[in-house]
Image: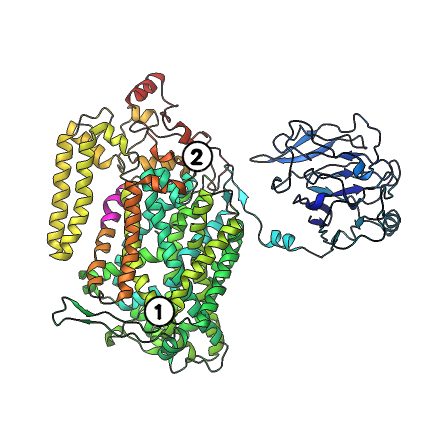
Amino acid sequence: MPLIVSRSIKIKLAALDGGLRPTIRSGPVGGNSAQPTLYLAANGDADEVLTWSNSRTSHTEVSGPLLDLASPNTTNLKPSHNNTSAIARTASRKAHTLQSIPDFGATHSTPRPCNGHSQAARRPAPGTERWKRGNLPPRLPATILRSDQLLVGSAINLPRRETSADRERSADSLPQGAAKIICQDAVFCATATASMSTSELPMTDDDGDSSNPPDGPIPRDRLDITITMMTFKSLLARLAPPPNKSADGRDQWPSRAAFLLASMGGCAGMGNLLRYPSQVFNNHGLQWFLPYLLCVFLIAIPVLALEIAVGQAYRGGCVVAYSSVGHRLRGVGLSMLYVGFVVSPYFVANLAWIMVYFRNSFTSPLPWEGRGEEFFERDVVANVDPIPGNFTADGSAVLDYTEYPGVALIGETVGWAAFTWLLVWLSIFRGVGLTGRVVYFTMGLPIVVTLILIGRALSLEDAARGVRLFWATWNGEQLGRGQIWQTACGQVFFSTGVGFGYFTTYASYNQKYSNAVMDAILIVSSNVLFENIAAFAVYGVVGFLGLFPEDGVRLGSFEVGFITLPSAVAQMPGANFWAVLLFFTLMVLGYSSAFAMVDALVTLVMDARPRWSRPLVVSAIVIVFFLLSLPYCTQFGYYLLTGIDRWTNDVALVFVVWAECVSSTTVYRWKDVVGQVGLPSFAIYNAGYFGGMILGVTIAQAVSPAAGAGVGFGLFIVCTLVAVLTGKVPDAAAPRVWNKSLFSRRLWFVAFYSVSPFLYPRGTIDADANLAKGNQLRCDLNQVVARGKNWSLPSFWGPLIRYISAPILAIVYSFSYPSFYELREDPLHILGFGVGHIALILVAGGFLFPRWLAPLVPASRRGEGKLEIGANVIPKSDDGDTIDSVEAGDGAGDMTDRAPEAEGVRGVSDADPDEKKTVLDRA
């Protein structure tokens, strides 16, 4: 039973092993009160709670439930000796209030001696919940103790330090068979750990003597009191505090800065320092920033705003959040987690290679000096060369598949992988309370070290030549080729980190009404800024080594991190110092991304099974991931990593984000559209929308881009016309621009109801009744994320992700199939291609068979995705208060509060009675 003695004695209620109870005794009543002394004694049933005594001469006891958390004013406490009142602190949602507990000394009881086991165990009053072992409340309200009071609770404040006279007097009165702990000093921390094999210790009588003293000293196996300066639990509580709780009981970030740093750490990984410079090098010149910045604004920010807003509004991980958007979108949420599930094992293996370099950085001279490529291939990855496959003469068929003769594990790589997984476990096993502290290190330190590396790289000889290559060169002809656009899109897409699920997961731990839109812009902007500043370290090295694209040199991500940069470091004065700094930075950057992906999977399990122990869940997942990372630690691990990584990124990740964009703007409240134009019209329009993208990019790859564009747009236009001509007459209003004719009203509902940027004309029901102004998902999310002064999702956000971001992603996705055709002789690339397509199966399976994924959603929340509300009606939050702070978060309502009322129409409370009736009839 932990006890921390400082200026206050804090007793944490844990398992009552063997029926032990602490008893607090002080000096005689009316005399000089001595320092409270703790005795440990047994008193019958271990299921009962603690027994407290406040007098040496009058053994008055307070037993039963210490404090009823549900109602602090109704407690089962026997009269205490002192005629005083107790003050207990209880937490409210926004402040701490003081509540008075009834006067325990109003009726004085005669002192009752404790005669050991001859006295029946005291029981709580009928109807009062008993706190049994293993079923104790996690936290008690704090209580206060003055020199003339005795209160019950989790904290007892000591009025003064114990004097030497007090200690001598207490020592003289120590009864036989009891153990004693004294507060030696106000700054001394001690712990009492009690354990025994039986519950047959004697109790003390009124005089402080043992009523049934044992013969000789108590054996150590029956009672063992250990005093330590600080227990592991108290140290853990200081270093890894449990997370805060929001009003709905969900874990919450310690601060907004912790959420932002954790999110930045997820996207600002090794790719910022390795992949981005290599892409810029291969597409050198200022023209690179035109497609790069366009993709930032057209893909990264809109999609990230979607992921953060959905997670924050629906208060759940990926599966729970997207299930609330639409119960058929559970597969979309699961596929996001699947991407992290595939990437995490080989990502940690990559970090293990970095740790091999880190270890060798302490060797002088550096072992890769003069043999950078050989050191990486032979000493780090230590892979056996494969036996290449062969095609037929015309390349139409595979004659021989590539063979990989090396299959043995590499011991050092396995060891460093285990070490990295241990770091991941330590960072997330306590939840966001601990992670919120870790990210200050994992993001703060790499930024500082990266700036140091940049300064060193730019001070190298001829470093300016490398900088001019990127910032003082213009190659406009590259903009006419598709390669630079595809590369820029892929870089922005991958470096931002959308599609991995951890943004939605992390946002679910935000305060309910945090500024999601501002957070999304801050995260993307910081990522863009960091990777462009960090690239200067590579620019200086490129000039120093004399590497230029005009010479036919091209750089890959692995080549930059494991060959180019180490080779440059080896030629610097103080090479060992700079090598340690470089690889330590890469390790920390990558490790912050690794635990972000794992944390998203942990949240999936904890959402579905909230009663499970989080440390056990984290341990199980980390062990599974460690086993999955072992194949990458073999003599063919590098080639396996290359195959899995390429097709996970090019197939799974791109498709998952495409599915996010199209499904959230199609499935959300789709019955509103069907109710206005009919199911045939809705189905025909979406057949043209999806069919145009799929058929268009297919023909573009098989025939020509012009043919693909013609077929795709043609099919979309034809289906749109048919849907508008065959739809039924809508009975809900449309914006003034679309309300002029029947056909324009139908077009607005089938094409723009979910994403329309237009407003309703003032004076109509839909404007004056505070109803939706098109773009239902945006308006509904803004009920939570745009409270008070928070930034709202803009009106163009919906059309952007549906009609611009999604088609761009479809085009990028289509490039993966011709690329795979050229590598179809490699079994590891075939494996990676198949692994990538499992994400497609998850999305399709979740859409067609949503019940299969229902166990991943809490039973109380499975109906949220089936919400039916009238067209144009916003489901109003139960909390009508406006939050005027960007960091607000204590309101009672959120998007999850509407599930029990899914069959009603809400959001019309501000309308006039006649308008309410019209809206209700329409719904």
Query: In this orientation, which residue lies closer to the viewer: 649 or 397?
Result: 397
Residue 568 location (% of width, % of height): 39, 77
Question: Of the numbered discs in the image, which one, if any, rests on residue 860?
Answer: 2
Is 289 placed left or right of 319 in the picture? left
Disc on res. 638: 1
* Amino acid carrying mark 1 in the image: Tyr
Q: Is residue 636 magenta?
A: no
Q: Is residue 801 magenta?
A: yes
Using the numbered discs, state the Cα–Cα distance from disc 1 to disc 2 in whole angstroms: 45 Å
Question: Splitting the image into 4 quarters, where does residue 634 fall?
Answer: bottom left
Magenta region = 799-807
Which residue is drawn at the image coordinates 39% and 23% (left, top)?
909
State the mark number for residue 585: none
Q: Are marks 1 and 2 in contact (CB under 8 Å)?
A: no
- As rendered, which of 310 and 900 lies closer to the eye? 900
Outermost top residue: 914
Quick one: quadrant of the C terminus?
Answer: top left
Residue 104 x/y as whole percent: 76, 29
Kindly identify the amino acid type of the residue bearing the numbered disc 2: Ser
Sequence-earlier tag: 1 or 2: 1
Disc 1 crowd rating (10 Å Cα; few below 14, some 14-19, many 20+) is many
In percent of the image, x 17 and y 52: which residue is there? 697
Within the image, what quadrant is residue 391 found in? bottom left
